[in-house]
Image (cartoon, grey):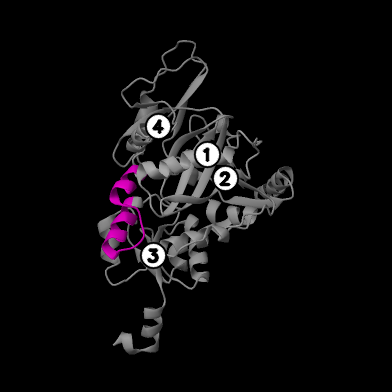
Amino acid sequence: GDGHSAAGRAKAMTRSIVLLGGGIDSLGIIARAREMGLRTIVVDHDPSGPGLARADVPLVASCYDPDETLEMLYHERPDALLCAGTDAPHVMAAVAQAYGLVGPTQQTAELSRDKLGQALCLKAHGITTPRLAKIGEALALAPGQWAVIKPIDSRGGRGVLRFGGDLKGERLDLAPLIQESCALSPTGRAISQEWVDGVQLSTESLIQGGRILWTSFAERNYDRLEEFAPHVIEDGSDMPPAIPSYYENDYEEKTNRSLQACVEAIGLENGTLKGDVVWTGSEAVIIEVATRLSGGSFCSQMTPMCWGVDFVGMAIRIALGETIYPGEIRPYLRGHVCQRFYFPPGKMITCHPDRGPSVITRGKTREEARERARKELEAMHDK
């Protein structure tokens, strides 16, 4: 049979990785896995997904459905798996359990996906999080304070709506916002969280043996909040963040301490942790964390361009059960990196997938990187 042929022997010798998600965010992750000599098995429900076209083994199935995914993997013996920019840790947990691979436990996966369960868990572990209310409960806001409503279990900014501000004691009719947010939750549930003022950060950490090896930080750009209100739409980010660090008040050290507490609270042993964090100037407030690789080219393009760290390659090695030694991660600032999105004129933007493509530029300074991004977007618009 196949096992005796040259092709069969090659297949047996080549290690395989399952990547959950074949959308645009998966492309950089698939490319890196292939460069590392791995056979890529990509799972996505959309037959026209760009990632499926690049996969060695494209599997058309919902990467959010554990039974469907496991059924399609029936003939495979994968050596590793990752969420490629998708929020499917529960499927990752099911596949990891079925094949004895590195991955989150079901409990960790649930805490990663369920924003209410996670917020309560982090709070119980003494981690600073925003004030929280379940929908149906009142979140008392002072004049000038803002809050967000968001689905308990969605992603990509879907159904994340900001409200509040200068209410002057008026009662805001939240019914339409609640309805919109709940409609975008697979389970029809939403929560309300206080909007914390400060520097909005995206973080991504490599985790091995329950410890953070290294974290990449970017400053999220919310310059267009008013334009797309009440939807909370991010227009890319800048790396590294423009936050002054003092010996007693180092934002990286303090944020890493909070993220390490999150790793322990949700019980993540090996993998990656994506974080949404606000730096208030004195402390890190954890908005939410997720046990997956980020989308939007954060891990696959921005981090290597800025710091020279092969983040995706290291995440793949952790997924394969290999050991990464701390001395291997040697970040050095290669340049400032700016990402900005193209917003198609006249298009209604209600979530991140509605944005157009992004440009990612590098410069000697933050300003130079931003100026390059502006020029590239102008050229895109002129086309």
Earlier-in-chain disc, 3 versus 4: 3
Q: Alpha-carbon distance for marks 2 and 1?
A: 10 Å
- Residue 61 is a magenta residue: no
Q: Alpha-carbon distance for marks 3 and 4?
A: 33 Å
Q: Alpha-carbon distance for marks 2 and 3?
A: 26 Å
Q: Quadrant of residue 193?
A: top left
- Judging from the image, what secondary structure is the residue with disc 3 in? strand
Please tell me which residue is depicted at 40% across the width and 79% down the height of the picture.
13
Label 1 CA crowd tier, 10 Å (few <14, some 14–19, many 20+): many
Name the residue that disc number 1 marks: 255
Q: Which mark is in front, 3 or 1?
A: 1
Q: Alpha-carbon distance for marks 3 and 1?
A: 29 Å
**The label number, if any, that marks residue 126 in the structure image:** 4
Report the amino acid beneath label 1.
Thr
Name the residue that disc number 2 marks: 217
Q: Which residues are magenta?
A: 90-112
Residue 327 image point, x, y percent = 57, 59
Earlier-in-chain disc, 1 versus 4: 4
Q: In this picture, is 226 found above or below 164?
A: below
Check contact, mark 2 vs mark 1: CB within 8 A.
yes
